Every structure is written in structure tokens, then in C-alpha cells.
Image (cartoon, rainbow, N blue to C red):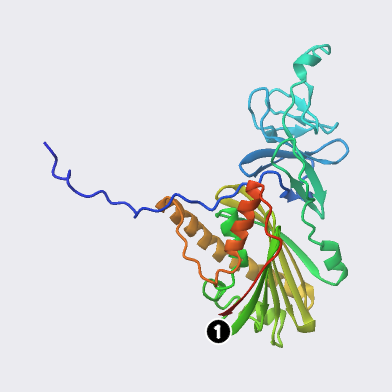
Amino acid sequence: MMGPHAMLPVLAPPPTKGHLSIARLTREWYVACRAEALGKRPLARTVLGVPLVLFRDGEGRARALLDRCPHRNVPLSLGRVTFEGHLECAYHGWQYDGSGRCRLVPGLESDAEAERDRPCPSAAVREQEGLVWVCPAFGEEPERPPFHVGVRELEDEGHAVVVREVEAPGTLHATIENALDVPHTAFLHRGLFRGVERHEVRARVRRTPVSVEAEYVGEPRPKGLVGRLLSPSGGEVEHWDRFFLPSIAQVEYRMGPEAHFVVTALCTPVSDFVTRLTAVAAFRTRIPALVLRPVLERVALRIFAQDQRMLRAQTENVLRFGGEQYMSTRLDLLGPHVWRLLRQAERGEPGETVVEQEVRFFA
């Protein structure tokens, strides 16, 4: 016999496509850590789901291996770096050089070379502008060099430069779209970045095979705290939002001759739903950097905490419904372009030469 509850309907979310905006570009450079973080101890990092261990070899060069000892599967990041610059496993003391070749198995005779020559997979590494970049595709060297932020050039122009690392609970695409999305700032960051007033703005969007940029024309100075700090006298601003393959989001503001502000977010996909951002912020204003820097840092971290909360809610809801459902309008300027570029790069397809459009909206 059927029980008293047998005929009750099964409650579940309405059906949703199982689509997820996840693109995995493995043969590319991603920031693993800041150079100063890589000292005498090995450092564990995950890039695109690949566990890596970073360390400096005997010549001080940054190296990256799969974070797993071939002997008994223990994380090599638990070990130490020897005087010779070898990575020593904490379990049995096996040692590996920067190329992943096993250089010592304690207790074996010296003529047992064949038994010791069991390599640990190694990843390509570049150290540039105080950052350590890795390619998570073992044995591959990306065709393009790592993205050049231009830290030295900015400092030579009188900018103060701040570097911070934060983690976002969202896909690479969602995190980049959030960083470059204008409309949400008037609501999620009201008072900190924008106010409730609306002004007509023109956006010129230009997409190349490897990037997309939106230039905003007619935008007044943001009414929030950040705008007042950077440009007390107000006036019209010059504003650009940019994306560069594989994972770079950049926001730039010029507020008359007195203020310039540019943030370059170097995004590293830790996993499908976690993205680490290494944010390089450079600013130049009439207010001395020593005075402005601590205030801007506090405000920026508060803004990111708001974004972080929303990205987490977005991710949890996508997983709860078993997929995404988007309704985009012309206000969603860069997200669709970013997704198109990511998918084309993942498939190895050439992008269009140049795509241009102009959009009018209120911001």
C-alpha cells in the first residue's frame, strides 16, 4: 500500500540548463604568488585545479613542481628546501631539483641511479615585476609572455603602487565581469563608489582577438567616497574598462590633470568556482600618497568584501539550480565579450579582427 505522503509532489527548483560559464585555458600564464612570498620555504598553490609547489633552486630561480612526491603521494610543500636548492620530501627525504628530477633517495647505493631517476612533473615559471607566473600545463611554454603591468613606468610617473591578494568565490568569468561591471556599483557599492543620481553616458566598445575595451564618454565624477578622495574638485572623468586574455581585468580613471587611478586585477583560476586576484593599484593625486593610501586601502577592501559576498551568493545559487540562466541587455557591456574571448581561446579559434559598437545608457 502507498503511504500517506506517497502522492505529495517532489519540491525542486524549476528546470535550468546545465550550462556553466567555465572556460579552462591551461596553456597560459597565471600569477602564482608575489616574488617576496617565495623565500626559504616551499609554497603550495593551486592553479586551474592543479596542486603546485613553488620553491627557489640553488641559483635563486623560482621553480614549480606538481605538489605530490612520486614515492608515496605526500605533498612536497610539506618538505623543505635544502642548502643545494633541492626540494626535500618531509616523509622519506627524497630530493628533487628544479626540473623535477630526483637527485637523492636516502639509503640507496650511489650506483642505483636508474631507481632514482623518477621525475616529478614540472611547470614553466616566469618571474616578472615582482610576481611569479606559472603555466599549469606541464611541459608547456605559453606563446605569449606574461601580462606587463608597467609598475616601474607608473612609479616613474609619480604613482603610488599597492599590491594586494584577495580571493573571490566565483568562476573566472563571473569574477572578471564583476570587476568590469558599471551598473552594479550604484547599488552594491552605493555611497562608496557611486550615488543614486543618473547621467547619460556613451560607451564605445572595441573587441580585438585578444582583448575588449569600453571607453566611457560624458561620465561625471563618481559621487561616492572614492571619487571625492581622488578628485575633490569634481568634473568629468575619462574612464576605461579593459579585459586581456587570458584573465586580466583593468579599470582606469583620469579625473582632470590632478588625478589618475588604474587597477589591474591579475586573475588566477584556483578552481572552477574560486578565483584569486592579485590587484595592482596605482594612483596619483594632489593628496600625498602617505595620507591617501591607508584610506583608499580600507575603502577598496570594503568594496571587495561586498563583491565577494555577492559572488558567493551568485555561485551558490547557480549550483543550487544546477546551472545558469542569464537575461542580458545592452547594459551588460563587457561580460558577453569576455565570455566569447574565453571560449574562442579555449577552443583555439581565431577571434574577429576588430568589433566595435557604441551604447548609450544611464550611470
Q: Is residue 42 visible?
A: no
- The image quarter in which residue 259 lies: bottom right
> Percent from the top left, x then y, of residue 204?
66, 74
The residue labelled by disc 1 is 198
At label 1, the amino acid type is Arg
Asked whether 255 or 332 is in front, the reply is 332
Q: Is residue 159 above or below residue 265?
A: below
Q: Is residue 251 visible?
A: yes
Residue at 14% in and 40% down: 3
Asked whether 150 or 155 is in front, the reply is 150
Q: Which quarter of the image is occupied by the C terminus?
A: bottom right
Q: Is residue 101 left or right of residue 168?
A: right
Q: Secondary structure at mark 1?
A: loop
Q: Is residue 273 left or right of residue 77?
A: left
- The image quarter in which residue 331 lies: bottom right
Q: Residue furthest left?
A: 1
> Percent from the top left, x then y, of residue 213?
68, 67
